[in-house]
């Protein structure tokens, strides 16, 4: 399985980072987590055919995580996609998603592929997707709007994605995490609805986490200084746009 960081920036406009989104590939399925930036461009750069993407999972409905959806659907239509596309969203956001599809007038593009909306309850841990040895589950996260975190299980590897959220007791409760992909909008500041690098190291037991990748990053934050102070460069990495992680049966490769 490959985890591609299509963007690693926060909602604040970044000079070199696109807004945060991920793509999971190589598990007999190709799944996009949130839709920011120019999704068609990014998918093509990692050799994903727009006709083959299986699903989109929306963690929440803030603009920086969903604004690329019209461009994605438009590109799929122009390339004559026929395969159904599944969009997963919290049941509390289903009406908003349908309104947005109506606003796009997607039904007037003569789209030849079905758009299937599958809802989940973001207030509880719930399985979203299972295929062979690969499984995706959601769990509640703390933000200003209904938001989820995600758990990816591949063989015996557990990858946790915090989403765009505060420090999370659901993540803290895991006895072991192979990769934690966590938002760090700030290096040191504590603010509502978001997390900082300092909070990550203070709140979680890093002895139970093999690798941490920071996303949802802001320009001009002293991440490097804080990592040097903490002496955590062996464990905590600052993710970069278009970087990827390879997750094999017993091997993690950045």
Image: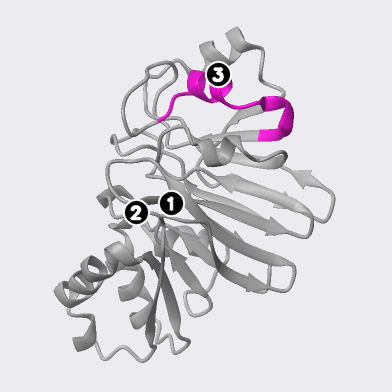
Residue sitting farthest toward the top = 229
- Residue 172's place in the image compared with 198, above or below, is below
Q: Residue 146, image x and y in percent?
A: 32, 51
Q: Which residue is mark 2?
A: 60
Q: Residues within 10 Å of mark 3 (few under 14, many from 20)?
A: few
Q: Residue 250, image x and y in percent?
A: 85, 50
Which quadrant is the C terminus positioned in?
top right
Element under disc 3: helix
- Residue 231's place in the image compared with 117, above or below, is above
In the image, residue 209 lies in the stretch drawn in magenta:
yes
Q: Which residue is mark 3?
A: 202
Q: Nearer the viewer, residue 116 or 18?
A: 116
Q: Nearer the viewer, residue 72 or 170?
A: 170
Q: Which region of the structure is painted magenta?
A: 195-211
- Residue 147's place in the image compared with 238, above or below, is below
Residue positioned 28% across, 47% down in the render? 145
Residue sitting farthest toward the right = 250
Tag 2 near tag 1, CB within 8 Å: yes
Residue positioned 61% across, 38% down in the render? 173
What colour scheme does the image use? one colour
Element under disc 2: loop
Q: Residue 85, image x and y in percent?
A: 44, 79
Quadrant position of residue 132: bottom right
Q: State the CA–CA distance, disc 3 to disc 2.
A: 26 Å
Residue positioned 68% across, 68% down in the render? 27
Q: Nearer the viewer, residue 102 or 171?
A: 171
């Amino acid at each position: 399985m490959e985890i591609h960081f299509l963007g690693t920036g926060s909602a604040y406009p970044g000079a070199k980072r696109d807004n945060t989104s991920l793509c999971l590939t190589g598990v007999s399925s190709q799944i996009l987590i949130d839709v920011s930036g120019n999704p068609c461009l990014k998918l093509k750069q990692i050799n994903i055919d727009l006709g083959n993407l299986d699903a989109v999972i929306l963690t929440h409905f803030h603009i920086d995580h969903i604004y690329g959806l019209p461009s994605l659907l438009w590109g799929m239509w122009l390339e004559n996609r026929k395969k159904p596309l599944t969009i997963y969203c919290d049941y509390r956001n289903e009406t908003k998603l349908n309104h947005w599809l109506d606003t796009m007038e997607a039904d007037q593009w003569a789209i030849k592929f079905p758009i299937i909306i599958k809802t989940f309850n973001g207030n509880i841990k719930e399985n979203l997707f299972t295929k062979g040895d690969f499984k995706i589950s959601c769990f509640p996260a703390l933000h200003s709007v209904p938001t989820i975190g995600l758990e990816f299980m591949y063989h015996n590897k557990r990858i946790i994605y915090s989403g765009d959220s505060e420090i999370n007791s659901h993540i803290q409760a895991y006895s072991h995490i192979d990769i934690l992909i966590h938002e760090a909008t700030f290096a040191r500041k504590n603010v509502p609805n978001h997390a900082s690098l300092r909070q990550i190291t203070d709140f979680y037991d890093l002895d139970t986490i093999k690798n941490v990748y920071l996303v949802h990053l802001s320009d001009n934050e002293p991440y490097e200084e804080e990592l040097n102070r903490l002496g955590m460069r062996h464990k905590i990495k600052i993710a970069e746009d278009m970087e990827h992680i390879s997750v094999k049966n017993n091997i993690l490769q950045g």
